[in-house]
C-alpha cells in the first residue's frame, strides 16, 4: 500500500509525512511494508451492527 | 465524555506510567464508542511495526493519516517501558476489526518480526496486564492470564511478531526479561578488626612490670651478695 492511498494522507504536514515514512520504514516508492499493511487490514473502528456481545 | 482515571501502582512506582490522553493527537475521550464493561473479555497485545525508537505521537501519525479520530490503542509501551495511556478504556477504540469492544489494546512499539521487545517493555506489559487482571475489581470480566492474547490469536496477522506466543507471551505472563539480572553478590565477611594499640599497651605494661620486678630482684641479689661479703670480712677480721 502506498502512503498516498491513506485516506487522510494530505492532512499531515510535510514534516509529519516525512516522519511517518521514516518511522514506518516506507520504501523509496512510498510503499508501506507488507507487515504493516496486513496489520492495518485487521484494525478498523467500525462498530458491530449488533453493538457487540457480552462475554 | 469518557474519563476513566487509572493508577497502576507497580508502574507508577517504577516511573513507567503516564496518562497521555490529553497530550496525544486525536480524541481520547469520545472515540470510537462506549461499550459496557461486561463486553470486555481480554487484553490484546500488538506491535507497532515501526522502528523501536518511535514514540506514541509517531503511532498517532498513521492513525491520523488513516482518517481516524484518535489513536486506535488504549495503551502504547515505548522501548524504555513507559506505558502511555492514550485511549480511554471505556471506549472500544480501533485495534482489532469487528471485535474492538471485546479487548483492551496494548501496542508495544517496535517490529517484532525483526527484533525482540526490550526488557523494560516485557516488564511493563506484565505490570499493566497484572493491574487489569488482578487489581481492578471494577472490571470483573478481566480475571486471568488466560485472557491475554496476541492480535494474531484473533485475526490473520503477524502481529505482535514472530516470538508470539511461543516465547513473548510466557515472558510477559511471568515477567521474564530477555537479559537475566545479575544475582547480587553478598559482601565478603571481614574478620573482626584487632585493637592493635590496646594490645601494644597491654604488652608494654606487662614488660614494664617484669622489668621492675627483675630490676628489684637484681638489686636484692646484689645487696645480699654485698652483705654476705661484708660478713665474711668481718668474720675473718675477728679470728685470732
Image: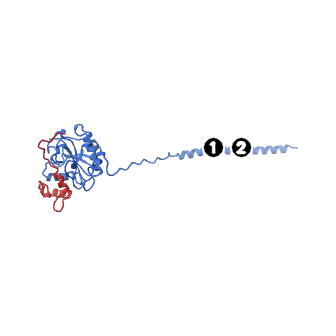
> In the rendered image of this protein, which colour is used for chain B?
blue
Locate residue A53 relative to residue B125 in the image: left or right. Answer: left
Residue B159 placement (x, y as % from top left):
22, 51
Question: Where does label 1 land, which residue?
Answer: B209
Nearer the N terminus, badge 1 or badge 2? 1
Q: Quadrant of the C terminus of chain B?
A: top right
Question: Residue B147's spot in the image, x, y percent?
Answer: 24, 43
Circle 2 residue: B220
Q: Residue furthest bottom?
A: A28
Left or right for B181, reference A23? right
For this rendering, which residue is in front, A12 or B154? Answer: B154
Letter of the red chain: A
Q: Chain of mark 1?
A: B
Q: Do the residues under discs 1 and 2 have CB atoms within 8 angstroms?
A: no
* Residue B114: quarter of image: bottom left
Expressed as whole percent of the image width and height from the top left, the position of residue A29 reads: 16, 62
Amino acid at each position: 500500500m502506498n502512503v498516498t492511498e491513506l485516506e487522510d494522507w494530505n492532512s499531515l504536514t510535510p514534516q509529519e509525512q516525512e516522519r511517518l515514512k521514516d518511522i514506518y520504514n516506507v520504501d523509496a516508492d512510498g510503499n508501506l511494508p507488507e507487515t504493516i499493511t496486513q496489520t492495518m487490514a485487521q484494525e478498523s473502528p467500525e462498530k458491530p451492527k449488533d453493538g457487540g456481545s457480552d462475554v | 465524555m469518557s474519563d476513566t482515571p487509572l493508577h497502576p501502582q507497580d508502574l507508577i512506582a517504577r516511573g513507567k506510567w503516564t496518562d497521555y490522553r490529553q497530550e496525544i493527537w486525536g480524541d481520547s475521550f469520545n472515540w470510537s464508542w462506549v461499550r459496557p464493561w461486561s463486553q470486555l473479555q481480554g487484553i490484546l497485545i500488538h506491535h507497532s511495526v515501526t522502528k523501536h525508537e518511535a514514540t506514541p505521537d509517531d503511532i498517532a501519525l498513521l492513525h491520523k493519516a488513516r482518517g481516524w479520530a484518535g489513536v486506535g490503542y488504549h495503551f502504547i509501551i515505548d522501548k524504555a517501558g513507559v506505558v502511555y495511556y492514550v485511549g480511554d478504556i471505556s471506549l472500544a477504540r480501533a485495534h482489532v476489526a469487528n471485535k474492538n469492544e471485546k479487548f483492551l489494546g496494548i501496542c508495544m512499539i517496535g517490529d517484532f518480526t525483526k527484533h525482540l521487545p526490550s526488557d523494560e517493555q516485557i516488564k511493563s506489559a506484565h505490570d499493566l496486564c497484572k493491574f487489569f487482571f488482578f487489581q481492578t475489581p471494577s472490571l470483573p470480566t478481566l480475571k486471568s492470564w488466560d485472557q491475554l492474547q496476541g492480535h494474531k490469536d484473533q485475526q490473520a496477522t503477524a502481529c505482535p511478531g514472530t516470538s508470539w506466543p511461543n516465547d513473548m507471551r510466557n515472558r510477559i505472563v511471568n515477567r521474564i526479561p530477555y537479559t537475566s539480572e545479575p544475582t547480587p553478590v553478598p559482601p565478603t565477611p571481614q574478620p573482626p578488626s584487632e585493637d592493635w594499640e590496646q594490645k601494644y599497651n597491654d604488652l608494654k605494661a606487662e614488660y614494664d612490670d617484669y622489668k621492675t620486678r627483675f630490676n628489684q630482684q637484681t638489686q636484692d641479689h646484689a645487696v645480699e651478695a654485698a652483705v654476705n661479703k661484708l660478713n665474711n670480712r668481718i668474720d675473718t677480721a675477728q679470728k685470732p
